[in-house]
Amino acid sequence: MNKLLLLLSLVVGTAGADNLISIDQVSSGNNNSTTVTVEGSDNEVDYSFGGASNSVSIDQKGDDAYVGYTTAWGSGAAWGGDLDGDSNNLNIKQFCNQSPCGGDRFEFHIQGDSNDIDFYQGYRAFSDGTLDTTDDYEYGGHYVRLDIHGSSNKFLGSQRSNNSGHEHSNTTNVYGSNNDVFAVQIGNQDKTLNLTLNNSYNDVDLTQKGSAAHSATISLSGSYGTDLDLLQQGGTTQTYSLTQSCVTVGGCSVGVTQGQ
C-alpha cells in the first residue's frame, strides 16, 4: 500500500506498492509547485519546504529510491524547510530497471533563492541539459548529498553505471552564489566526487568516466572565481585533489585530463 502525507497542493502519480510521499510546507508561501511521479515499489519522497515560487519535479522509476532531506543534517522543518528560500527549481529523475535495485538517493539542504538544480540518476546528462538513453542494465545505488546555501547557483549532473555493484557518489556542497557546476559520473567501477565551493562565480565542468574507479576532491575559495575543467577517464584508476584560493583579478583557470 502506498502512503501519502501532504500539507500542500501538488500533482502526484504512483504505480506500485509501499511508496511513501511526505511533503510538509512549514511556512506560508505562494505559487509553489510540486510534481511527483513514481513507478515502482518502496520508493520515498520526504522533505519540508518554505518560501514562495519554488518548483519541484521528482520522477522515480524502479524500486527503493529516495529524494528528501539529508541524513547528514536531519529534517530541516525546524529551521524553515529542506528547501528554504524563494524561486528555487529542482528537477530530479531516478531510474533503475533491474531487480533488486541498489536504491538511488538524492538528498538536499538548501537555504537560498533562485537556485536551479537538475540531477539524473540512471541517466547521462550533457552540458546542454539533454539526456542520453538509459542503460540496458541500470542497477542504481547512486548517492548525492547536495547542500546549497547560496543563491543563483546552477547545478546539472548525472550518475550512470550500467553494471551491478558499481555505485557513484557525489557530495557537492555549494556555499557561494552565482556558481555554475556540471558534474557527470558514468561507466563501471565506483566514481567518487567531493566538491566544495566557498566563494562565488566559479564555472566547473567535471566528468568521471571509463571502466576504472576514479575519485576527485575539489575545494574552491578566494576573492575571484575559478574556471575548472576536470576529465578523469580510462581503465586505470585516477585520483585528483585540488585546493584553490583564487586571488587573481578576473579569475583563475585550471584544466586537467587524467587517463586515456
Image (cartoon, helix red, strand yellow):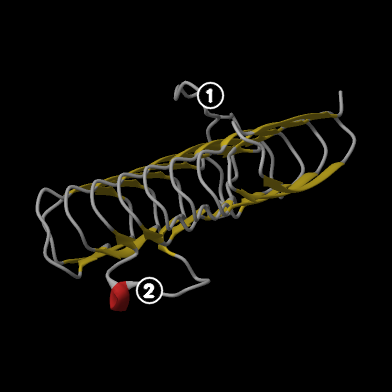
The residue at the point 34 percent across, 64 percent down is 82
Secondary structure of residue under mark 2: loop
Secondary structure of residue under mark 1: loop
The residue at the point 15 percent across, 51 percent down is 10
User: For mark 2, what is the residue?
Assistant: 75
User: For mark 1, what is the residue?
Assistant: 126
Q: Residues within 10 Å of mark 2 (few under 14, many from 20)?
A: some
The residue at the point 66 percent across, 43 percent down is 247
The residue at the point 58 percent across, 41 percent down is 224
* The C terminus sits in image quarter: top right
Left or right, 92 with reference to 251: left
Left or right, 227 with reference to 80: right
Left or right, 213 with reference to 208: right
**Residue 163 spot, x, y in % from top left:** 69, 39
**Residue 113 spot, x, y in % from top left:** 30, 50
Looking at the image, residue 117 lies above or below residue 77: above
Name the residue at the right extreme.
236
Q: Which mark is residue 215?
A: none
The CA distance from mark 1 to mark 2 is: 32 Å
Going from N to C along the chain, the mark reached first, 1 or 2, is 2
In the figure, residue 111 lies in which quadrant?
bottom left
Looking at the image, residue 198 lies above or below residue 208: below
Q: Amino acid at mark 2?
A: Ser
In the figure, residue 7 lies in which quadrant?
bottom left
The answer to whether residue 1 of the structure is visible from this angle is no
- Camera-side residue: 199 or 69? 199
* The N terminus sits in image quarter: bottom left
**Residue 24 spot, x, y in % from top left:** 22, 67
The answer to whether residue 174 of the structure is visible from this angle is yes
Q: How many marks overall? A: 2
**Residue 169 spot, x, y in % from top left:** 64, 51
